[in-house]
Amino acid sequence: MALWVCSTPESSLSLTGMTIPIPKSIDATLTLLSQGGYIADRSLATALYLSLSMGRPLLLEGEAGVGKTEIAKVLAATLGRRLVRLQCYEGLDIASAVYEWNYAGQMIQIRMAEAMGNSNTDSLSQDIFSDRFLIRRPLLQALTPDASGPPILLIDELDRTDEPFEAFLLEVLSDFQVTVPELGTIKADQPPIVIVTSNRTREIHDALKRRCLYHWVGYPTAARELEILRAKVPGADQRLAQEIVAFVQSLRDRDLFKQPGVAETLDWAAALTHLDKIALDEQTIGDTLGVILKYQDDIARIQGSEATKILDQIKSEIAAAHDRVSLGGRL
Ligand SMILES: Nc1ncnc2c1ncn2[C@@H]1O[C@H](COP(=O)(O)OP(=O)(O)OP(=O)(O)O)[C@@H](O)[C@H]1O
Ligand SMILES: [Mg+2]
């Protein structure tokens, strides 16, 4: 059986044609992410830096909408690498994740051979089970050489797959090779950069976790969330941005069925900017709560007096913070 070694260059070329090396420090990793519009805290940058420099997959777990998937996208964009995404779901199989044969194409080839009187079955079988009829799915694509360097392989929402697929993945992540029985073993000499995400709807198996570095992506602090909002929705009014972040942070302290993620904060900022709002008020909150809360029970809990209470509290906190800043400036 053949062993194909897919060779790829060590460094990569960005869209601008410049070579983008892997960051050499945690600070350089933070800078790289921020160049792609991703505002990371130091612990996440440390995990990513170690994953890149040690060549180990990075498993990111966390609540929905906290920026797990975005890391892989930003990494691909800033390093100038190809992003190969495997979106996981229940029932995901090898044919969708690794490869399958182009049966229709093979049938046409067989019919053509028959029509031309070709009775050499060995050469026909070699022909139809060649690279030409192989459909590469994400895991195989990630082992295929690319001029820009090893791609970023995003295995997204792994917790949605079933355990047999996870066991199969274990092999791929250990050896970075897959075997196609009719062709042989396909292996990349430089493994892809692997980011695995999970929303923890079920526990990922220990054996897989052991092969990865692990980082829990939590909700950002208010200061970081404000920074993210400014980077992602630059058109939002300054005061509105502060109030939105304070309101959402305050919601996260409450016992809700589904707390709003960063994605919801950004959506709310974009929605209120579309409505030409420059500050939060009771009416606007009531009319737009569905942008940040997606369960009717949660909306019913917050709408009305609870929203007014939060609004009063955050307005007085923001005013107090402004007073402190202006007092500090005068001293
Ligand atoms: N630290 C951050 N810096 C910049 N943008 C961020 C950050 N965190 C989240 N975002 C933004 O929030 C949105 C949601 O991010 P993303 O889709 O990566 O979340 P997720 O954790 O993968 O969510 P899910 O579990 O629902 O898939 C994106 O628009 C992303 O740009
Ligand atoms: Mg995601």
Image: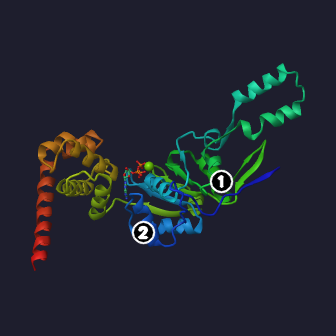
Q: Secondary structure at mark 1?
A: helix
Badge number at residue 119: none
The residue at 88%/25% (across/down) is 118
Q: Secondary structure at mark 2?
A: helix
Q: CA distance from mark 2 to mark 1?
A: 27 Å
| Left or right placement of residue 244 versus residue 168 in this view | left
> In terms of sequence position, does the residue under pointer 2 or pointer 1 come before the other?
2
The residue at 15%/43% (across/down) is 284
- Residue 42, by quadrant, is bottom left
Q: Residue furthest front?
A: 17
In this view of the protein, which residue sits in the foreground, 149 or 219?
Answer: 149
| Left or right placement of residue 163 versus residue 99 in this view | left
Which residue is tagged 1?
Answer: 172
Q: Residue furthest right?
A: 120
- The colouring scheme, among rainbow, by chain, secondary structure or one colour, is rainbow
- Marks 2,1: beta carbons within 8 A: no
x and y, in percent, of residue 311 in the image: 14, 53
The residue at 74%/41% (across/down) is 131
Q: Which quadrant is home to the C terminus?
A: bottom left
Which residue is tagged 2?
Answer: 43
Residue 93 shows in this picture: yes
- Residue 148, by quadrant, is bottom right
At label 2, the amino acid type is Ser
Residue 303 shows in this picture: no
At label 1, the amino acid type is Val
